Image (tube, rainbow, N blue to C red):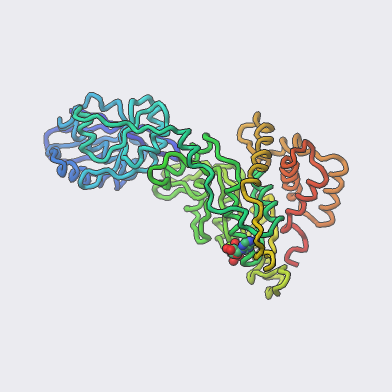
Amino acid sequence: MLIKVFGGAVQGVDATIITIEVNISRGCLFHLVGLPDSAVKESHERIKSAIKFNGYKFPTADVIVNMAPADIRKEGSAYDLPLAIALMAASDQLISEELDKYLIMGELSLDGSLQPIRGALPIAIKAREEKYKGLIVPKQNAREAAVVNNLTVYGVENLTEVVNFFNKKVELEPMVVNTRDEFFLQRDVFEYDFSDVKGQESVKRALEVSAAGGHNLIMVGPPGSGKSMMAKCLPSILPPLSLGESLETTKIHSVAGTLEQNTSLISNRPFRSPHHTISQVAMTGGGINPQPGEISLSHNGVLFLDELPEFTRSVLEVLRQPLEDRHISVSRIKYSIDYPASFMLIASMNPCPCGYYNHPTHACVCTPGQVQKYLNKISGPLLDRIDIQIEIVPVPFEKLSEQRPAEPSIEIRKRVIKAREIQDERYKDFPGVYCNAQMTSKLMHKYAQLNESSTKMLHNAMVRMNLSARAYDRILKVSRTIADLEAKENIEMCHIAEAISYRNLDRENWAG
Ligand SMILES: Nc1ncnc2c1ncn2[C@@H]1O[C@H](COP(=O)(O)OP(=O)(O)OP(=O)(O)O)[C@@H](O)[C@H]1O
Ligand SMILES: [Mg+2]
């Protein structure tokens, strides 16, 4: 008897339907065809054990399994369950009439219990698109998949439950989550808050500007000046995720298997801080069984690179393209995949190898050459993509021991949200542009115009500080954001002046 069961394969962050066909005839061989990888081939042993352990019979005849379409590589152990169900149906142990109405995925243990899978969300989205009646997945993935509305999702614990369901011996309880409730329930809980950071008003202000306009930012300062601490506070002042953004980000985390169990939607912007020993593949995504990398896991959030010069040059260089394009294409011989990667880059570094260059009280022991060499570890084109560059000086002890709490993040965030609302309105007719940092030159021409006196001042400053031409665009974008924070329509002198002060590394006298 020929049986068809349906499952899903994830490519990039989207799923494709996979048809599993099983035919049983006389003989005693087991054939699995249709580009399965070794984990899928090994499923034979797991399925056999699971079927026998639960008191069913494993067919003792010729079994041919075909997974179609044949040109898509089937990876991992998530096909165990649909394969087992197809085998049971082909050997007349399961009623097959409803099988084509469901999408089924899950990994089997030897005793027939189910293990969670990756990519349940994109598979659920595909199931709804293709109008399947329901989706059957391991219990741990049910909440994640149930985010998709107009699709019945069943979370199951073991093989027997699924067999009994199709044999109409039991009814399964569909998983129901109210996406909106769930989303708003967990929002806005943050570990770090700016009220704990003493002093450092100018750095906090720069972070506020960066959050308001989506600008990339680098902090340069000596050890212990609070760089890492303040970067960790940044999520608490970023504008909240919209439901649409949340779905995009959750999809990526679903594919990567980094969603916490029993969560349905990611409700806060991701903050990823990979260690500087990270490999290029882990940063960009890819690998033998392709997975999204850190830049995609920080989609719609922050990628924080602490101690920037310690990252290998090749890892830093691959950031350049996604920083411009906001997605990454990974091409290998066997596949080519596109992952979204729209993130804010926040970096920190010491100014020199010893860490004390430009320090007010501590002498630096590095030669000017060493300082320059340290900075040169970060290439010009990468630095060019960082709008705000600020120097941090440690706060004196008197300030640190001050009891008065600083302004809490929630207040700063209100201003950021206001500035973002202005930008939402401004860019509503420009798809793909959400904040000032993403302005194209055409948009800059339209929205970041300077009057005569401001132009003159900027010109003078550029000549006097010997700023590079590439700093010009950055200054304009940042001034636009500063003006938005004050709800000013036109960019004024004071906005430009502040933006110029955020070009510390461009100054000619930096590093002597
Ligand atoms: N302005 C501040 N207010 C409150 N605490 C601070 C401040 N600056 C530094 N600290 C304290 O100093 C500690 C060290 O700061 P942090 O690790 O952020 O420094 P860093 O600049 O990242 O140093 P490194 O270059 O060594 O990584 C923090 O955990 C915090 O307790
Ligand atoms: Mg640090």
Image location of residue 57, percent across then percent down: 13, 38
Tell which of 212 and 6 is nearer to you.
212
- Residue 404 picture quarter: bottom right
Judge left or right: residue 243 versus residue 64: right
Q: Is residue 497 above or below residue 306?
A: above
- Residue 71 picture quarter: top left
Image location of residue 425, percent across then percent down: 67, 31
Judge left or right: residue 378 versus residue 478: left
Which quarter shows the C terminus?
A: bottom right
Residue 328 visible in the snapshot: no
Tell which of 275 and 162 is nearer to you.
162
Q: Is residue 137 above or below residue 167?
A: below
Numbered label tally: 0
Judge left or right: residue 96 versus residue 319: left
Image location of residue 475, percent across then percent down: 75, 47
Image location of residue 42, percent across then percent down: 25, 47
Q: Which residue occupies the extreme front position in the image?
A: 403
